[in-house]
Amino acid sequence: MSELSDEASEPELLTRSLSMWHGPGAQVSWEQLAIPLDLHTAASIGQYEVVKECVQRRELDLNKKNGGGWTPLMYASYIGHDTIVHLLLEAGVSVNVPTPEGQTPLMLASSCGNESIAYFLLQHDDLEGPPHVEETRP
């Protein structure tokens, strides 16, 4: 069977992939592979139960930005995970934290056509618009 065969089993593919790091023939247990998801990753891939557990533990800053400058709410808003957005909003996250480029979760949701999420964010009570500038006349 060729290395690119569709008939290769998942364990075979895993063993081949891991041999790059551990050397040929190395045995890696499933326990060693059980790496927990971080909050940002869980929010981005829609892992509601993982996000819920992080919220319930109250050990993490739910507004913390990752290395790319995004919060969990930004990922969930951008990708369209409604239930995770609801969960994070109920937990009190800020909807006003911008990306390094200045985009808020509302802007991210809107840019991807996630209308229901944009609506939820607009209904959130701490949403702020741009600063009001009074017109001055000569």
Image: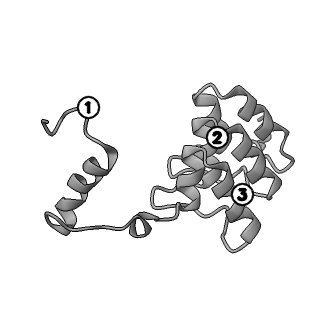
Residue density around tag 1, few if under 14, some if 14–19, many if 20 or more, within 10 Å: few
N-terminal-most mark, 3 or 2: 3
What distance separates the C-alpha of mark 1 from that of mark 2? 35 Å
Depth-wise, is mark 3 or mark 1 nearer the camera?
Answer: 1
Q: Amino acid at mark 2?
A: Ser
Q: Amino acid at mark 1?
A: Asp
In depth, the one of 138 and 2 nearer the eye is: 2
- Figure quadrant of residue 115: top right
* Position above or below: 21 against 102: below
Residue 6 circle label: 1
Residue 19 circle label: none
In depth, the one of 119 and 126 nearer the eye is: 119
N-terminal-most mark, 1 or 2: 1
Circle 2 SS class: helix
Q: Amino acid at mark 3?
A: Lys
Q: Residue at x 62, y 44 (%)?
A: 76
Which residue position is annotated with label 3?
52
Q: How many marks?
A: 3
